[in-house]
Image (cartoon, rainbow, N blue to C red):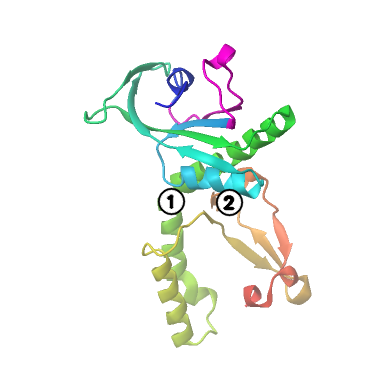
Amino acid sequence: IVNGQIGFMQQRAAGELQIRVFNPSIDSDGWESDHTVVELVNDDRPFLVDSASLALTEMGVGIHLVVHPVVRVDRNDNGDLLRVYPRDEEGGRAESVIQLHIEKHTDRGDLDAIRERLVAAMADVHRSVDDWQAMVAAVKDAVEHMPGWAPGVKESWMAECQDFMRWLIDDNFVLLGVRDYAVRGKGDKATLNVVGGSGLGILREDKGTRRSRPVADLAPEARR
């Protein structure tokens, strides 16, 4: 484990994100760096490093170093760390341990903003990974129902659309979010309305969904 993280991960419940953004010092941490340090501990999942790096890049924060061991650990029911397994020994639960060295920030507000952005990014990863199978199932269901939703579409066009949807879920696309909408009204007064409970991944409705949107606001190709 990289500098100090064995202490940082001493207590953690399953599914919990541990994160800190700090400037290590000899007095408080026993080591120091020319960079601000970000440390995250997660259940091991896909996309964690890429999502953290992208979030920082979007904020204009330069990244100087990324360290990402995946370790296997035992914890008790309280989340206390009991054992870290050697690399060549099986057992335990996989946890992702990430340390990023970023450009120096000393303002407390900047450090808090970085932390908040990373917390949001990790939450999106958790939603997307947890809901992956349900999103694939939703796409498959949509493929079966498409002819009934658009009965006036030429059979050849509909078959092409269905083939495209099947291609997407054949490991050719990463689903981040899925949501159903109902079109209500006609013409310029038509609106897209969220179907309650249909949001998955990053489109789960616990993220403050806007429940209706005028169809006229959409690009022409999205209104067809």
Tell which residue pokes out farthest to the right in this image: 188
Q: Quadrant of residue 53?
A: top right
Tell which residue pokes out farthest to the left in this image: 89
Label 1 Cα crowd, 10 Å radius (few <14 / some 14-19 / many 20+): some
For the residue marked with disc 2, what is the amino acid?
Answer: Leu
Q: Residue at x 71, y 59 (%)?
A: 212
Q: Residue at x 64, y 43 (%)?
A: 61
The foreground one among 131 and 28 is 28
Query: Magenta span covers which residues?
Result: 14-36
Q: Residue at x 62, y 33 (%)?
A: 115
SS of the residue under disc 2? loop
Q: Quadrant of residue 190?
A: bottom right
**23 within the magenta span:** yes
Q: Which residue corresponds to mark 2? A: 203
For marks 1 and 2 on the same chain, the one whose residue lies earlier in the sequence: 1
For the residue marked with disc 1, what is the amino acid?
Answer: Trp
Q: Which residue corresponds to mark 1? A: 132
